[in-house]
Image (cartoon, helix red, strand yellow):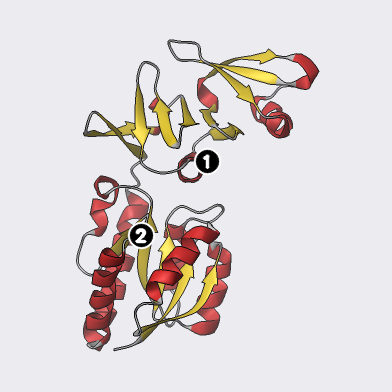
C-alpha cells in the first residue's frame, strides 16, 4: 500500500541521498522536505504525511522534540529516525514498531523499513499502535536521557560521558575524540559531533576542532588578534582558534 513521506535533515546531501533511495520505491511518494525541525512541523501541519524520516540531531530544536510535537497533533505521522550513530547508540529504538535508519543510508536497510511501513499501512490498528509506540518511547527517552558518546578503539565500543571529552579533532577524513589521557574514533563527521555536543558546553573553535569549554585551562594570545587554547589534558594540548570564532569564544569564556 502506498504512503506519503516528508524528509527532514539539516544536511542537504543527506536529504538528497535519502530522497534518491526513496525514489526507487514506487509505494513511497515524497511530498516535501525540510532542513530543520520548525520547517518540518509546518510541513506536517500542512501536508499531513503518513511518514516523516527525521534526523535526530539538528541545530535548534532536536528531532526528538520535533517528533513529540508531531505525535501530539490531531493527525500524527509515523516517525522513522535517521542518525549517524552506530547500533550500540540506537539499540533502544529496536523496540516494537519503532524504526530507524543509520547514516550513510543503505538501500537494503531502507527496503526493510519500506516493507515494514507498507505492512503497517495495510492494517489501521497496527498503524495507530506503531505511532503510539513511538510516542511512548520518546516520552521515556525524555525522562531518561543518557548523555554518552559512542566511540571505538581497537574494535571495542566505549560510551564516553560527555564530561570526559576534552576535545574532538578532524584529521585525514576521520574524527578523533580525546579524553584527558586517551583518544578514540567517532563514527560520524565533525558536523555530527558538533550537533551531538553543542548544547553540552562544547564550541567549534576551528574547522578541525571542537572543544569542551569546561576543560579549557588557558588562553594564549598570538599575533594579529589570533589565539590558541591550552586544554586541560595531560598533554596540555594547544588548539588554534579560527578568526571568525574569536569574538564569540571570548564572550563564552568571559574574556574582555
Q: What percent of the width, then of the height, locates residue 108?
A: 26, 66
Q: For the point 78% across and 21% down, which residue is it? A: 225
Q: With 167 as the anchor, is 120 left or right in this view?
A: left
Left or right placement of residue 104 versus residue 62 in this view? left
Task: Using the numbered discs, state the Cα–Cα distance from disc 2 to disc 1 in whole angstroms.
Answer: 24 Å
Image quarter hosting the N terminus: bottom left
Q: Secondary structure at mark 1?
A: loop
Question: Would you name the residue on which mark 1 appears?
Answer: 198
Residue 179, disc: none
Decide: few, some or many residues near mark 1? Use Cα within 10 Å; few <14, some 14-19, many ≥20: some
47 with respect to 94 (left or right): right
Q: Where residue 55 appears, x then y in whole percent?
A: 44, 59
Residue at the spot x=20%, y=62% of the render?
A: 95
Q: Earlier in the sequence, mark 2 or mark 1?
A: 2
In the image, which is nearer the foreground, mark 2 or mark 1?
Answer: 2
Q: Residues within 10 Å of mark 2 (few under 14, many from 20)?
A: some
- The percent coordinates of residue 175 (x first, y second) are 43, 34
Figure check: 20 above or below 90: below
Quadrant including the C terminus: top right
State the residue in front, 52 or 105: 105
**Callout 2 touching callout 1 (CB < 8 Å):** no
Residue 143 at what x, y percent from top left? 34, 51
Residue for badge 2: 105
Does 53 sit left or right of 95 as displayed?
A: right
Examine the image and state in which quarter residue 182 appears.
top left
Q: Residue at x 34, y 85 (%)?
A: 27
Amino acid at each position: 500500500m502506498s504512503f506519503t513521506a516528508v524528509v527532514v535533515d539539516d544536511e542537504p546531501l543527506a536529504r538528497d541521498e535519502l530522497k534518491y533511495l526513496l525514489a526507487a520505491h514506487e509505494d513511497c511518494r515524497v511530498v516535501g522536505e525540510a532542513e530543520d525541525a520548525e520547517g518540518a512541523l509546518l510541513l506536517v501541519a500542512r501536508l499531513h504525511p503518513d511518514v516523516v524520516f527525521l534526523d535526530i540531531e539538528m541545530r535548534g530544536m532536536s528531532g526528538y522534540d520535533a517528533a513529540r510535537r508531531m505525535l501530539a497533533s490531531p493527525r500524527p505521522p509515523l516517525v522513522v529516525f535517521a542518525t549517524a550513530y552506530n547500533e550500540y547508540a540506537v539499540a533502544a529504538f529496536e523496540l516494537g514498531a519503532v524504526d530507524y535508519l543509520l547514516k550513510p543510508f543503505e538501500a537494503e536497510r531502507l527496503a526493510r523499513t519500506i516493507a515494514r511501513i507498507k505492512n503497517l499501512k495495510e492494517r489501521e490498528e497496527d498503524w495507530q499502535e506503531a505511532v503510539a509506540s513511538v510516542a511512548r518511547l520518546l516520552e521515556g527517552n525524555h525522562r531518561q536521557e543518557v548523555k554518552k558518546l559512542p566511540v571505538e578503539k581497537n574494535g571495542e565500543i566505549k560510551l564516553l560521558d560527555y564530561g570526559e571529552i576534552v576535545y574532538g579533532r578532524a584529521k585525514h577524513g576521520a574524527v578523533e575524540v580525546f579524553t584527558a589521557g586517551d583518544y578514540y574514533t567517532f563514527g560520524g563527521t565533525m558536523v555530527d559531533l558538533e550537533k551531538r555536543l553543542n548544547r553540552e558546553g562544547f564550541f567549534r573553535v576551528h574547522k578541525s576542532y571542537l572543544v569542551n569549554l569546561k576543560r579549557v585551562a588557558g588562553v594564549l594570545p598570538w599575533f594579529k588578534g589570533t589565539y590558541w587554547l591550552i586544554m586541560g589534558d595531560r598533554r596540555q594540548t594547544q588548539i588554534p582558534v579560527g578568526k571568525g570564532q574569536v569574538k564569540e569564544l571570548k564572550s563564552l569564556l568571559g574574556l574582555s
